């Protein structure tokens, strides 16, 4: 699944008239780039959620025949549901086997085969791609890569899922997950909610692991200037 429903408020003025998913990097939209990225690993059946200028995404997918992938739309036109709500809305399309979830504005060369192998080796409820990069908000893991909490280093706010954990290691989330569909019966929240908050609720009793790919290239194309940097990183 690719999350493409966001308002993209940091990406103005482009998002005043277009969805961020269709912002261009070296002649290809973020959406096309990530569809083709997933194809490198044999992933061709995709769910894409839409809200902000969703019809433009539908039109782009239709005119380009999904860039070679089979696409199912999860429609959030009436209300954008954020990451947790967006995942819950797409449940009918995702049950049956573990699935990969990613944000449309992430560009990376993370080796998904390695991440998938790690997930099936350890069989957690979810595996989260993380790196050592500097940011303001971090997931906190113990030495066994188990998620224990979350920290905002700018405000000092912390949310702990496993308060007794000793050594806590800060890792920046990459917006890429592998999730077991067993998560769906555990989701109690309704409407609009964050998947980060969901993970922090579940991590006290469920295995949620980090997968470090700090050796990979990665950029969050959150602002127009980051699209210029992305063009240099991903020709």
Image: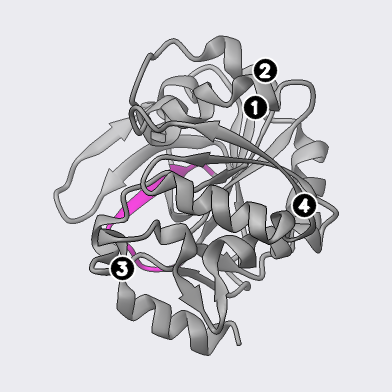
Residue 14 badge: 3
- Give me the residue at 43% from left, 36% from top: 83
Q: Earlier in the sequence, mark 1 or mark 4?
A: 4
- Whether 161 is drawn above or below 55: the answer is above
Name the image quarter holding the C terminus: bottom right
Crowding at dot 3, Cα within 10 Å, few <14 / some 14-19 / many 20+, comes out as: some
Image spot of residue 105 (x, y percent): 47, 60
Q: Is residue 195 above or below residue 64?
A: above
Report which quarter residue 81 is drawn in. top left
SS for callout 3: helix
Q: Is residue 151 left or right of residue 107?
A: left
Give the crowd class for mark 1: few <14, some 14-19, many >=20 residues within 10 Å.
Answer: many
Which residue is label 1 attached to?
A: 125
Determine the image quadrant of residue 165. Answer: top left
Q: Which residues are magenta?
A: 133-142
- Report how far apart the C-alphas of labels 1 and 4 lie in the structure: 27 Å
Specify the label residue 182 is tagged with.
Answer: 2
Q: Give me the C-alpha separation between circle 4 and circle 2.
A: 26 Å
Q: Say above or below: 31 vs 94.
A: below
Q: Is residue 59 magenta?
A: no
Q: Secondary structure at mark 4?
A: loop
Q: In the rendered structure, which disc, 1 or 2, sits on the residue that comes first in sequence?
A: 1
Q: Check the image and name the residue furthest to the right.
A: 42
């Amino acid at each position: 699944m690719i999350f493409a429903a966001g308002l993209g408020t940091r990406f103005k003025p482009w998002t005043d008239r277009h969805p961020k998913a269709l912002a261009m990097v070296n002649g290809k939209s973020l959406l096309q780039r990530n569809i083709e990225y997933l194809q490198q690993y044999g992933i061709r059946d995709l769910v894409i959620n839409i809200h902000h200028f969703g019809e433009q995404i539908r039109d782009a997918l239709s005119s380009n025949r999904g860039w070679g992938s089979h696409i199912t739309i999860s429609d959030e036109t009436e209300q954008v549901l954020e990451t947790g709500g967006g995942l819950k809305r797409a449940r009918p399309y995702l049950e049956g086997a573990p699935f990969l979830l990613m944000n449309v504005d992430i560009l990376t060369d993370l080796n998904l085969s390695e991440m998938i192998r790690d997930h099936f080796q350890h069989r957690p409820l979810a595996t989260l791609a993380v790196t050592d990069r500097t940011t303001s908000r971090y997931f906190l893991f113990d030495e066994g890569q188990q998620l224990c909490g979350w920290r905002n280093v700018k405000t000092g706010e912390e949310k702990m899922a496993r308060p007794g954990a000793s050594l806590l290691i800060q890792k920046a989330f990459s917006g890429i997950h592998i999730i077991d569909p067993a998560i769906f019966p555990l989701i109690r929240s309704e409407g609009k909610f964050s998947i980060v908050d969901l993970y922090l609720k579940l991590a006290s009793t469920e295995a949620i692991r980090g997968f470090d790919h700090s050796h990979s290239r990665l950029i969050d194309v959150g602002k127009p200037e980051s699209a210029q940097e992305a063009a240099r990183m991903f020709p």
